[in-house]
Amino acid sequence: MNRVFWITALIAFINSLSLTILIPIIYLYGKQFGLNDFQTSLLFSIYSIAQFFATPVIGKLSDRFGRKPLLIISLAGTVIANTIAGTATTATLLFLARFLDGITGGNASVAQAVISDVTDQKNRAQAFGIYGAAMGLGFILGPAISLLAQQISLGTAFLVSAAVAMIAVLMTIFLLPETLKTKSPKATNIFDLGLENLIKGLAMPGIGILLLINFCTGLTFTMFTYAFQPYFIKVLDQNSRSLTLLFLTFGTLGVIMQTWGVSVLSRKFNVVKILFLGLCIRSLSFLLMPIWPNINYFIIVSILFALFNALVQPMISTLISLNAQPQDQGTALGLNASYLSISNGIGPVIAGMIVQQSKPITYSYPLYLAGVLTFLVLVLAVATRKKYSNAI
C-alpha cells in the first residue's frame, strides 16, 4: 500500500469519527426537540434520502473533474451542516441540517474511488478491508468523544463533529494529491451527471445485482440501527452512556475483524464466500437479539453481530470495484453508496412505523424482521453469485 492510500485511509478515519460522534445521540437529540419515535426516524431518513440523489452525481463528477475537489466539497458540507445542527433552536433547523449533510455526503464513495485508483486488483480486497478498518476505528473513538461531548450537551457533540470534519477538509487540501488519471467525457445534460445511472446501474454486468444486494443489506442494517436504540434504552432499561459504550464496542470488534479477520479469512476463502458468511451470521444475530430481554444476553449476541457484520460492506465494495472498469470506479462506487443511502432512508421509517411508544415489546419487531430479510438477502446472493463472481 502506497502513501496516497494511507492518507486516504486516515481521511476516511477522520470522516468516520465525525459521523460516529453523532450516531449515539441523534435519537436522543430529536427527543429534546419534542419529536416522537416516528419523527426521530425521519432524522435518520432525510439524511440518507438526500444522499441517495446526491451521491451518484458526486461520484460521476469525481470521474470528470477529479477526486480531490469533490472530496473537499463533500466534507465541507458536513462541517456546515453539523454546525447548524449543533446550534439549532427548532426541529426545522435540525431537519435542514440533516438534509444539507446528506446532499453533500458523497465523501465515502469518492474516498473508495481514490483507493481503486491507487491499488491493483490483487490487493483490492485487502485495501478495502483496511479502509473499512479505518472507518471502524472511527466507530471506536467517535462514541468515546461523543460521551465526553455529551457531558456539556448533545448539541456540543454536533459542534465537535463539525470540527473533526474540518480537519479532514484541511488534510484533503494539503496532503492528498489528485489520483484520477483518465477523466470521463463532459456531460451534455443533467442526467449525464449520474442521475440516470440510478436506473442504468441495475443493468450493468456484474454490478447491478450487487447494487440490489447492497440496497437490501442497508435496509436491514438501518432497521436494526434505529430500532435497537429505543429497545436498548426502554426495554433493557439502559441509558445514553451505556448505549454509547455499546457503539464503542461495535467499532472495536469491527476493526479487529476488518484487519486481522479479513486477512485470515482471505487465505482460506474468496471474497464471495466471506460475504456469504457475514450475511449468514448477521441474519442469525438479528433473530437472536430480542428473544430474551436481558442486557448480558444482548451484549453477547451483539459481539457476535459486530464481528461478522464488519465483513459485509468491504466485500460488497470489493466485488463492485472488481467488476467496474477503471474509468467507471467513481460512478460504480457512487451508485453503490447511493443505493445504500436510500436503503438507509427507508429502513428507519419502516422501524419507526412498526414500533409503538405505548407498547415497548414492539421495539423487538424490527429486529426480527431485519433477521428474516437478511436471510432472504443471503439466498439472493447465493442464487445470483455467477453474475458477479467472474471478476475474482
Image (cartoon, grey):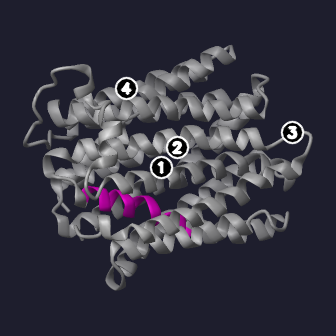
Q: Residues within 10 Å of mark 3 (few under 14, many from 20)?
A: some
Where does label 1 land, which residue? 215
367 displayed left or right of 383: right
Q: Residues within 10 Å of mark 1 (few under 14, many from 20)?
A: many
Where does label 4 land, which residue? 76
Above or below, 222 relative to 151: below
Indicate the secondary structure of the residue bearing disc 1: helix
Badge 4 or badge 1: first in the primary sequence: 4
Q: CA distance from mark 2 to mark 1?
A: 5 Å
Residue range in magenta is 307-321
136 displayed left or right of 365: left
Badge 4 or badge 3: first in the primary sequence: 4
Mark 3 residue type: Gln
- Give the percent coordinates (x, y) of residue 138: 48, 51
Where does label 2 land, which residue? 343
| Contact? badges 2 and 1 (CB < 8 Å) | yes
Q: Of tags 4 and 2, which is closer to the observer? A: 2
Q: Which residue, as the protein is rendered here, is positioned at the far left? A: 182
